[in-house]
Image: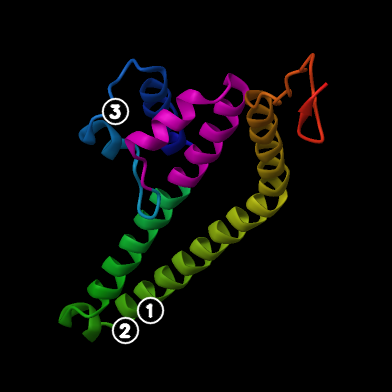
């Protein structure tokens, strides 16, 4: 939750314009596999407020999850590397403890990814179709139907009547 709160504040200040979308500010909210660019911020700014909230919520969720998984994978790599240290490798209790910790971490990562997949399946279909419909409606409202001018003297067989 702490990760999500931090990302939410940073993303809101970028979208509102309180913070400029510089490379350093964009890096604060970027996560492995989730790149937030100036174009993303500008696209969010152009959306209606209701859609902004939905999109920002999804982005915060994806960024927070990606960061949490990255930290868990880093901890896992540390445990795997630490298990290879000669003093740890020589002690059966230390090896067992490292193996147990790695197994628990693997299970937690799997649980987190499972929860994320379930949330995406439940939420994303509705949200995606809603946003597509809203975008199509906005696009349709921008087009102006072409009206043919009424000619008081129409042509008939190549002659003016």
**Picture mark count:** 3
Residue 129, given in percent of the width and then of the height, sits at 71, 43
Eyeballing the image, is 69 above or below 52?
A: below
Residue 160, given in percent of the width and then of the height, sits at 77, 23
Seen at 31% across and 61% down, the residue is 74
Checking the image for residue 96, the label placed there is 1
Q: Do the residues labelled 2 and 1 touch (CB within 8 Å)?
A: yes
Checking the image for residue 60, the label placed there is none
**Residue range (magenta):** 35-64
Eyeballing the image, is 109 above or below 144?
A: below
Judge from the rendering whether residue 71 lies leftward or rightward of residue 82; answer left or right.
right
- Quarter of the image where the C terminus is located: top right
Depth check, front residue: 92 or 26: 26
Judge from the rendering whether residue 70 lies leftward or rightward of residue 27; answer left or right.
right
Q: Quadrant of residue 133?
A: top right
Q: Residues within 10 Å of mark 1 (few under 14, many from 20)?
A: some
Label 3: state its secondary structure. Answer: loop
From the image, tell me which residue sits under label 3.
21
The CA distance from mark 3 to mark 1 is 48 Å
The CA distance from mark 2 to mark 3 is 52 Å
The CA distance from mark 2 to mark 1 is 6 Å
Depth check, front residue: 76 or 57: 57
Eyeballing the image, is 158 above or below 91?
A: above
Residue 52 located within the stretch drawn in magenta: yes
From the image, tell me which residue sits under label 2.
92
């Amino acid at each position: 939750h702490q990760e999500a709160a931090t990302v939410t504040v940073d993303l809101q200040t970028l979208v509102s314009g309180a913070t400029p979308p510089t490379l350093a500010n964009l890096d604060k909210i970027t996560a492995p596999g989730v790149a937030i660019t100036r174009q993303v911020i500008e696209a969010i700014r152009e959306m209606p407020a209701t859609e902004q909230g939905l999109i920002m919520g999804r982005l915060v969720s994806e960024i927070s999850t990606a960061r949490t998984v990255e930290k868990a994978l880093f901890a896992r790599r540390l445990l795997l590397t630490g298990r290879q240290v000669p003093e740890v490798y020589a002690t059966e209790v230390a090896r067992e403890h490292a193996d147990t910790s790695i197994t628990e971490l693997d299970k937690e990562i799997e649980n987190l990814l499972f929860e994320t997949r379930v949330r995406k399946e439940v939420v994303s279909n509705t949200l995606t179709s809603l946003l597509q419909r809203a975008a199509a409606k906005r696009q349709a409202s921008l087009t102006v139907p072409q009206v043919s001018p009424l000619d008081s003297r129409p042509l008939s067989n190549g002659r003016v009547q």
